């Protein structure tokens, strides 16, 4: 009986030994084709979600993956690729037609930015969660940095200033609103983690106040009798802008250390939860993916094309503004940010549609923080190195809209949930600001401005003070 019992026990235990030796079932298309994944040892380890199952460059498969892109909307954008060579050719052949060149370059920027976003997304899949999100956001902002540097080279300081704030507004109101609206169409409520929303909204407020300091300083000194000349005030504002830029860069570095080192576990857990509740996760895992070499190649091609098209676009801005009644505020605050942030917007909306709201928020808020605390200070520092008077003295209208937008978004994010109504209201606010920017006069339109300047200077200063006081009271600081 004992022997029989031992035999039974031996037979019962046999399946467990076999199961230990059995490989895991394939979960992705690459594992089905190439066999189960064998863990690789070395300096570079690619996440399973980013495994392509290939190495090097395969031209036909490379083009097919880029064409399919990450979503239906991104794939639809790829239809615009024929406009890219047309825009480059027009910039050389149709120099006397600024509207044609600007329109073609503006449209051509969208598929190029989309390729930067897609290549960055594919590269981010191969990295740990937090590093991947940061890399993807940084790569997507390449278009913005290129445009800022070309505008700086042409001394279009006002357009840069408007584009900095316009980029922040586009991410905070338009992109975030579209994400909430897309998520709300598929489910009653979309929820997100406080670690993403609270830290993000606090940083937005700090960044907004930092960007507002030079403008408030300039308006306060101009409206007071300190006996300073206009040149003295401009010089002081320039020094303040450079100091604030350095402080912003330091603050952004501390924020990265917070996310990547001391508190990365919280963010990793949040993003892992988002991956688990991804509505199309099984489809994404089954899709063919770019190799590391193909990601780098796609980024190199798209950045080169964006640079060429951005030069053509920026060269025509003065003619469009002067001859076709498009104001500098509308150009910088609305038109330029829309095209430079196209890649991030498409990525974030697709993530929100798939119920990855934390990823979507990270792209919206992360890109906003990066513009305010990295890209804007970077432009000031580069201008400082090149001995150019680039500062953070914004129009009062622009900076007030920024502070009010930060307060609005902070209230929306406070309860860690959203629906399509909140998204629609954010979009409505952005459209209202765009309408006001369209009718805002150009800085060089000085007809009657000097006569009215003395009468309105004190009023605008008081209005700005009232807005700031209301904001501080709303936040419980007064």
Image (cartoon, rainbow, N blue to C red):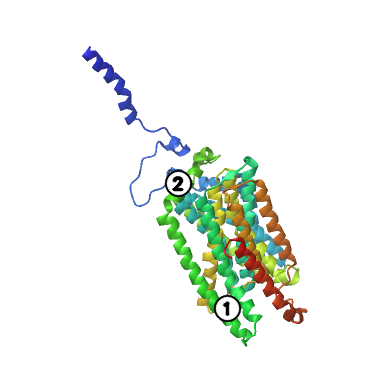
Residue 257 placement: quadrant: bottom left
Depth check, front residue: 470 or 315: 470
Residue displayed at 53% across by 55% down: 198
Q: Is residue 210 left or right of residue 49?
A: right
Task: Name, please, the residue furthest toward the top.
Answer: 1
Q: Vertical placement of 336 versus 48: above or below? A: below
Depth check, front residue: 140 or 234: 234
**Residue 297, percent from left and from top:** 49, 55
Q: Is residue 454 left or right of residue 58?
A: right
**Residue 296, percent from left and from top:** 47, 55
Task: Name, please, the residue furthest toward the front.
Answer: 478
Query: Label for residue 237?
Result: 1
Residue 102 placement: quadrant: bottom right
Numbered marks: total: 2
Q: Is residue 247 left or right of residue 438?
A: left
State how far apart marks 1 and 2 are (Cα).
43 Å
Question: Dot 2: few (<14), some (14–19), or many (≥20) neighbours within 10 Å?
Answer: few
Question: Dot 1: few (<14), some (14–19), or many (≥20) neighbours within 10 Å?
Answer: many
Residue displayed at 63% across by 44% down: 184
Considering the image in quadrants, where does the N terminus appear?
top left
User: Marks 2 and 1: in contact by CB < 8 Å?
Assistant: no
Say which residue label 2 marks: 269
Q: Vertical placement of 337 versus 9: above or below? A: below
**Residue 221, percent from left and from top:** 62, 80
**Residue 83, percent from left and from top:** 65, 56
Q: Find numbered disc 2 in the image and state the secondary structure of the residue it sits on.
A: helix
């Amino acid at each position: 009986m004992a022997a029989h019992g031992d035999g039974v026990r031996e037979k019962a235990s046999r399946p467990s030994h076999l199961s230990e030796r059995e490989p895991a079932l394939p979960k992705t298309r690459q594992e089905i084709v190439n066999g189960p994944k064998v863990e690789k040892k070395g300096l570079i380890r690619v996440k399973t979600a980013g495994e392509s199952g290939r190495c090097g460059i395969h031209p036909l498969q490379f083009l097919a993956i880029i064409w399919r892109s990450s979503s239906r909307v991104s794939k639809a954008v790829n239809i615009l690729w024929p406009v890219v060579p047309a825009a480059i050719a027009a910039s050389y052949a149709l120099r006397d037609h600024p509207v044609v060149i600007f329109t073609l370059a503006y449209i051509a920027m969208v598929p190029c930015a989309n390729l930067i976003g897609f290549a960055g997304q594919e590269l981010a899949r191969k990295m740990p969660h937090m590093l991947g999100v940061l890399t993807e956001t940084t790569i997507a902002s390449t278009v913005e940095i290129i445009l800022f540097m070309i505008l700086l080279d042409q001394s279009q300081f006002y357009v840069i200033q408007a584009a900095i704030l316009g980029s922040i507004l586009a991410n905070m109101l338009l992109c975030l609103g579209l994400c909430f609206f897309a998520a709300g169409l598929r489910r009653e409520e979309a929820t997100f983690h406080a670690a993403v929303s609270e830290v993000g909204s606090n940083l937005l407020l700090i960044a907004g106040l930092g960007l507002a300091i030079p403008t408030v300083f300039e308006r306060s000194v101009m409206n007071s009798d300190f006996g300073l000349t206009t040149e003295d005030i401009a010089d002081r504002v320039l020094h303040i802008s450079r100091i604030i830029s350095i402080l912003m860069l330091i603050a952004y570095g501390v924020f990265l250390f917070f996310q990547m080192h001391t508190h990365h576990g919280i963010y990793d857990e949040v993003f892992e939860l988002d991956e688990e509740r991804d509505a199309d996760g099984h489809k994404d895992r089954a899709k063919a993916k770019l190799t590391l070499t193909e990601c780098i190649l796609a980024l190199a091609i798209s950045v080169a094309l964006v640079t060429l098209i951005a030069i053509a676009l920026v060269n025509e801005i003065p003619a469009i503004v002067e001859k076709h009644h498009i104001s500098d505020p509308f150009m910088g605050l609305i038109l330029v940010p829309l095209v430079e942030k196209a890649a991030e917007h498409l990525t974030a909306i697709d993530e929100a549609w798939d119920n990855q709201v934390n990823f979507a928020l990270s792209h919206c808020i992360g890109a906003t923080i990066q513009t305010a605390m990295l890209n804007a200070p970077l432009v000031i520092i580069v201008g400082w190195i090149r001995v150019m008077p680039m500062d953070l003295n914004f129009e009062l209208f622009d900076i007030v809209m920024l502070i009010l937008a930060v307060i609005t978004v902070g209230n929306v994010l406070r309860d860690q949930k959203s629906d399509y109504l909140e998204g629609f209201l954010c979009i409505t606010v952005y459209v209202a600001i765009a309408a006001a920017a369209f009718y805002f006069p150009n800085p060089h339109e000085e007809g009657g401005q000097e006569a009215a300047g003395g009468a309105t200077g004190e009023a605008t200063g008081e209005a700005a003070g009232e807005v700031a006081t209301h904001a501080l009271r709303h936040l419980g600081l007064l």
